[in-house]
Image (cartoon, rainbow, N blue to C red):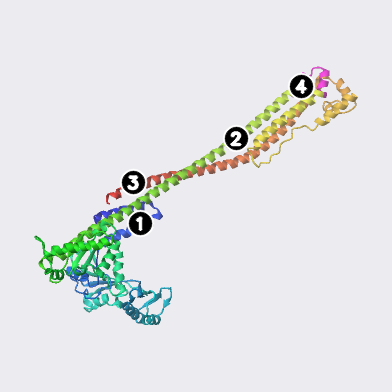
Amino acid sequence: MKATAAQETLTAASLLLEQTGDPAAAGLLHELAEVRRRWAEELPQVALVSGFSGGKTSLVKHWFGLPALPVGRTATTAVATRVAFGDPDLVILRFRPEVVLTLADPLTGIDRSAADALRTWAQEGDASFHLADGGVAGPAEVVALVDGVRAVERPLHLTVRFSPRPDDAVSLASVPGNWLPCRLTEPALALPLAEVVCHARHPALRQVTFIDTAGYGAATANHRETARTVLGRLPDATIVLLDARQMDGVRSREVLSEVWRDVETEQDAAAVLVGLTHWSALMRSEADDRDVPPGGTLGQTLLGEKIRELHHLLHIHGRHRPSTVLPLELRDPPPDLRDAPGAMLAAVLRQAASRSTAHRARVLTGLTERVRAHLRAAAGAAERERAQLRRAADEADAARRRVATRMSALVEALARARSAVENALAAQERSLVTAVALARTRKELLTLVAERYPEALETATDQLSETVADQHRLITAHLPGAGIPLPDMSLDARKQDRFDRARDRVTGFGYRSRRFADLGVRSIHEFAKAPHEKVRQQARRNAAADIRVLRHRADDWLADLDAAAAIHLATLTRERQSTAETAATLAAEAEAARAEAIRLDGLFRQSRRLGQYT
């Protein structure tokens, strides 16, 4: 994958995420920015791994010069040394906040180098010391602990925490010639260093960065841990240097075991290149004892044997095979091996570029899938929010319609009650007037006054009471909590009238009744002597007066209903207005959520184009 394509993909993914405006995307945006920055600044990394004094630093010096790097017969490089493109005079020291040292172990014994470094830092350095159980040891306690270690029954670990220090850029021209070798090899000086960056102006360093590590099999645990730390970073390519004379040795087995610990696929193994060092010495030792096959050379024969031996070692571990195995000779190489270091460099550049491209493609695919998943989730969340708001708006509108229905039902109930009462009053008025009109003779008038009119009036009031009671029940169902009493539609004189009429029938005279008094006579004898038309007119007036009383009571009841209904209608009006406003607001929010869901879905559809880069 080209760097520009990867950067374009990361930029496009970041822009899509930023357009969502989702605070939850901040973490993924930061990760995209960090990957974009790292890929813009960092080149593919190549790690050089071997047993100590295995020729790693010599190979780096052969490629790039770097005379200041130390080379020796012991485990010299105690600090990971990064070789990058730049000014050869510039060296950058990077410091670590803490380091865990194994002072003693039952398997490896006492680490004297770590003990010396601890003693030096306890006496002179600016650091704090923390025991494995969480306790803190002072400088005097550390010195006593180091000096008192004898028998090793259990691992003894100490954590050394250094004062924070920024990166230190040093010009080699301003320091003594042995300054850098001492920094890299002296345990006490190397202890706080995380990494040293050296520079050279070699074209290959524009493509990759090389990391020279401490050798496996070194005497100090600090050296071994440095190498494991570099391998834990999963470099894009690894150069493994093995002594061709001791392919089956302990150091070779340890190196292969550590390197192949992270080799899980054929692609991982393809990024490992094996260089067989001390090839000339092997050739000289085997020259007299070998019969070269016809058409072949001793070098080809030995190389085939060593490759088969390497494959056998890796097969024992159940591992995949490396892509490249080359013989190397850095000191006075024969003519056929003079180009071997260059071939190794060219091969590692190809593998590192291929591995880095594949790695970045996997990372980019994972990131774009996460971006697309986030966009899909954001669009889905917006759509769910739209649906929820739409349901809420529909519920609010339904509530508004229910309130309007209640208002209409109340108004209709009032109208029905008024109409029913008016119809009942009119019907009873007609019945009373008809009863008076049908009394034509004096005898019929007497019967009307004494019997038929009270019965008709009682029937009228009973029927009107039933009508009012029915309407009262229907209306109060629409007026919860109004507390309107049921009116009394009876007339107070009815019971007394019945008593008077009964006594009149028995005695035939002498007892005054309210009905006779209303008719303007003192007794039935006076009534019998009264003019015929005068009695009729008075009966009509009495009927009209009774109807007026009933109408007045009905009007009072209807007025109370109207007042209570007006209050309740005002409450319902406010409720309807509130629910209407709520429904309108929710509908607007649902429409905005719909637009947002469409926009986010569009971003998700645009994210499909991210895959074209990967």
**Cα separation between marks 4 and 1:** 97 Å
Q: How many neighbours does mark 1 have within 10 angstroms: few (below 14), some (14-19), or many (20 or more)?
A: many
Query: In the displayed structure, would residue 289 be above or below residue 525?
Result: below
Mark 4 vs mark 2, foreground winner is 2
Secondary structure predominantly adopted by residues drawn in magenta = helix
Q: Amino acid at mark 4?
A: Ala
Q: How many neighbours does mark 4 have within 10 angstroms: few (below 14), some (14-19), or many (20 or more)?
A: some
Res. 86 in view: no
Q: What SS does tag 1 mark?
A: helix
> Is 77 contained in the magenta span?
no
The residue singled out by tag 4 in the image is: 435
**Cα separation between marks 2 and 3:** 52 Å
First along the sequence among labels 2 and 3: 2
- Per the rendered image, the range of residues in magenta is 432-450
Image coords of residue 419 (percent x, y): 65, 29
The residue singled out by tag 2 in the image is: 409
Mark 3 vs mark 4, foreground winner is 3
First along the sequence among labels 4 and 2: 2
The numbered dot on residue 382 is: none
**Cα separation between marks 3 and 4:** 89 Å
The residue singled out by tag 1 in the image is: 29
Query: In the displayed structure, would residue 340 be above or below residue 455?
Result: below
Q: What SS does tag 3 mark?
A: helix
